[in-house]
Image (cartoon, rainbow, N blue to C red):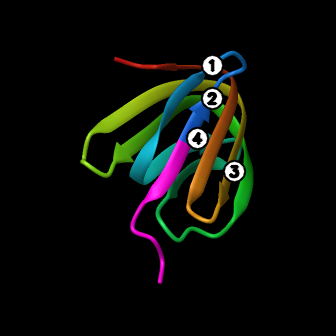
Amino acid sequence: MASSSLQVSVVSADREVFSGEATMVVAKTVEGEIGILPGHEPMLAILAGGEVRVTGVDGVKVTASAEGGFLSVENNNVSIVASAAELIG
């Protein structure tokens, strides 16, 4: 049975920008925007500059700006490693 949440980590070259549980992550890759839900197949993608949107298990939405790097998904763990990233708003 698939887990009902994701463990998400967004880091930049010098710090952790966000870490927590989420129900959905949306990010822009060089091949287009992708949405990640619990149970997503393992994947590795190159990030394009843009927003990373995380919907927490409590419904709170967090948005970060990320430039360059990659996104990795495996076993309901989403890791976003960007050369530069910061929370928006």
The residue nearer to you, when weighing 53 against 31, is: 53
SS of the residue under disc 2: strand
Q: Which residue is mark 3?
A: 72
Q: Mark 4 sits on what residue? A: 28
Where disc 4 sits, the SS reads: strand
**Mark 1, mark 3: which one is toward the viewer?**
1
Q: Residues within 10 Å of mark 4 (few under 14, many from 20)?
A: many
How far apart are the two marked residues, 1 and 3, measured between alpha carbons? 18 Å
Whichever of callouts 3 and 2 sits on the residue coming sooner in the sequence is 2
Q: Nearer the viewer, mark 4 or mark 1?
A: 1
Residue 81 in picture, x, y percent from top left: 69, 34
Label 4 to label 2: alpha-carbon separation: 16 Å
Residue nearer the viewer, 13 or 83: 13
For label 1, the crowd category at 10 Å Cα-Cα, with few meaning under 14, some 14 to 19 and many 20 or more, is few
Local SS, label 1: loop
Q: Please report whichever mark, 4 or 2, sits nearer to the chain's N-terminal start.
A: 2
Q: What secondary structure predominates along the stretch shown in magenta?
A: loop
Q: Are marks 3 and 4 in contact (CB under 8 Å)?
A: no
* Real-space Cα separation, disc 4 to disc 1, in angstroms: 21 Å
Q: Residue furthest bottom?
A: 1
Which residue corresponds to mark 1? 15
Q: Which amino acid type is marked by label 2?
A: Val
At 69% from the left and 50% from the top, the residue drawn is 72
Cβ atoms at labels 2 and 1 below 8 Å apart: yes
Q: Amino acid at mark 3?
A: Ser
Q: Is residue 74 magenta?
A: no
* 61 lies above or below 38: above
Q: Is residue 60 left or right of residue 20?
A: left
What is the distance, in whole Å, between disc 3 and disc 4 at their CAs? 13 Å
Q: In the rendered structure, which segment of residues is drawn in magenta?
A: 1-8
Separation of marks 2 and 1 at Cα, in angstroms = 6 Å
Alpha-carbon distance for marks 3 and 2? Answer: 12 Å
